[in-house]
Image (spheres, helix red, strand yellow):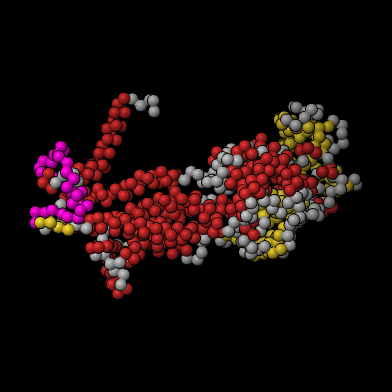
Amino acid sequence: MEHTSLLERVLRGIALTLVVVFFMFPIVWIFMMSFQTNEMILRIPPQLVFEPTLANYTALITGKLQTAAGTLDIAFMRNLWNSIFLSVTSVAVALLLGVPAAYAFARHKFRGSEDIAFTLLSFRFAPALLVLLPLTLYFQKLGLANTYFGLIWVYQLICLPLILWIVRGYFEDIPADIEYAYRIAGHSWFATFRKIALPLAGPGIAAAGLLAFIFAWNNFVFALVLASADKQPVTVGALAFITSSGIQYGQISAAIVLSITPTLALALYAQRYLVEGLSLGAVKG
Amino acid sequence: MASVELKNIVKRYKSQTVLDDLSLTVADGETLVLFGPSGAGKTVLLRLVAGVIDPDEGRILIGGEDMTDVDAEFRGVGMAFQNFALFPHMSAFENIATPLEAKRSSHGAIKGGVDSVAKLLKIGHVLSHKPRALSNGQKQRTALARALVGSPPVLLLDDPLRNVDAKLRFEMRLELPRLLADRGATVIYVTQDYKEAMALGDRIAVMSQGVIRQLGTPEQIYREPANIEIARLFGDPTINLLDVKPQRDARGIYVGLSNVQVHLAGAPEAAIGRDCVIGLRPETLHFVAESEPGAIPVTVEAETPLNEKIVTLVRTVRGREILVSRPSGTPGQSGGKAHLAVNAKSALLFDHASGERIGSKNIVSLRNGEAA
């Protein structure tokens, strides 16, 4: 590193800055827009210096949206709660079902195990819109349409394959000898799963859970079709900002900032596990 | 206390047969060494006894009880793995304690048990460390301690010295026999190192390709190897192998080595007139004066001192290379012309085509319907 010349360092700095600006610009811009009124946002040319306002956030939190056409009710906080509830519960259910299943697929090769695992993965191949029409009809027949239960069930299509396939890989990376050693020491297979496999795959499970959470959180189309207003997550709820009197850019930006905050916070918190999970140095050797 | 008995074990992976109708009995308190090249099926055999894999055919008896369908945790065996297989998220103490925890021992009993075995293996000072903070030698001792701590009647040691450095391996080779004898356990020990096999085994089972080729005491394996392959695997420097055709004259059976008739007292009649390979251990060859009867003329090519012994490479008149080993400090030849005498009693005759030793009585062939 000492051999890098000044020019090299400057060029590297510029390159890094370009990359960061390129990727961060939309987020920074949205963050700035969330503190501006619609008039300020739509001004041409756009201005970097402005008088910040909290009006957008106030509108979201109080649920009263002031537009040129009058006051609109916005269920944003309700949507945010729905998002949190749906995502957390879906991931929890998917972990509960997926982690033991992943262990079974990783450790016990039985007839057709590969086929079953692949079928589960193939849920991710099918275009959601193709699945949705029959699903909606069935859900209406079964009385599952517009229920949290039904939504969480459908969200398993997103979360379960993801968790299953990622966690399976982590279980497969644990040397079988380590588990054998615990069995030979006199412990049952379940104790081995709990005390050896789970802790060692822990970082991987955390990473898979986080990824599944992000996917569930960002889901739009399932909730759009299967949920009505009071069960909708933020992704669908944001449609309410396209009003008859125009698109409410300020509120949309504020809504985005509020809705990415939980995932961002979670990602930052779990970063440690993600890095650890991806390197998995602890198990080898 | 427990003997281990394997009856007609067959283990296949896909179409490959790893163990082929193998039977073996290890007496109570005996140390049996499984020796053979990698891929011989040694580790598979050990795992079958441990119960972590199941045989396709055959029965496994431990202490006279059929354990074939019994889960690993109920078999009462201790095992040390070649790659140590320590639990990376637990300290050395917790690692060693796992067999005692499984027995629901009291807190004090666990502490006492771990401490005493750790003291025995000299790892008392690193008990609080995680495996990643341990040296290879310490890992190996931790793994061994974990296998020993529960005082299992059957101990399975899978090449535990493979991944440790030469110095420690030498130390452990001296320590282990005493350690194992003190435990009084039945031990099955897997190794690829013939010195380890000779040092540790009450008996050695030489395996290759899923079959036990020879079963005997270290002495028997060394003095009376069942075939050329086994003769070559045991001994350092390697046994000298020369093509010969034994003949008979008035004085008995002889072979021609460099135009000299060397009489082999006690050589089997069956060898006469057959294409054979004679096996001469380097330490059974001696430099002698030219006048000695049966002395073979050779040219000394190179001499290599190896601490306790000196190995000399010589070339016969016909250009064949022979290794001669002698203890350090004894007179020898370091160059030029020399003469060798063969110790006729220790010469081994193998059939050229099959590689089997001619006249061997103790060949153990456990393969049904096929002569070894």
Residue B370 is left or right of residue A211, and the answer is right
Q: Residue A1 in the image: x percent, y percent?
A: 39, 28
Q: Can residue A262 be seen in this view?
A: yes
Above-or-below relation of B82 to B71: above
- Report the residue that reaches farthest toward the bottom: A141
Which quadrant of the view contains residue B251? top right
**Residue A265 located left or right of residue A236:** right
Residue sitting nearer the eye, A205 or B350: A205
Asked if A57 appears above or below A110 in the picture, the reply is: above
- The count of marks equals 0
Q: Does the magenta stretch include residue A47?
A: yes
Residue A225 as seen in the image, left or right of residue B257: left
As rendered, which of B245 and B111 lies closer to the eye? B111
Q: What residue is drawn where x is 75% and y is 46%?
A: B182
Residue nearest the viewer, comparing A51 with A94 = A51
Q: What stretch is highlighted in magenta?
A: A41-69
Residue B314, image x, y percentages = 74, 33
Q: In this view, does A154 lie above or below B158?
A: below
Whole-percent x, y for residue A237 in the image: 22, 58
Task: Give the camera-side residue of B135 and A92.
Answer: A92
Residue, far right: B250
Q: Residue drawn at (60%, 38%), measured in percent from left and top?
A: B126
Residue B104 occupies quadrant:
bottom right
Work out whether residue B39 can be spotted.
no
Q: Which residue is drawn at 71% across and 31% down?
A: B306
**Residue at horizontal 34 percent and vertical 66 percent from the top:** A149
Quadrant location of the C terminus of chain A in the rendered image: top right
For residue A160: magenta?
A: no
B319 above or below B90?
A: above
Residue A179 position in % (x across, y down): 56, 53
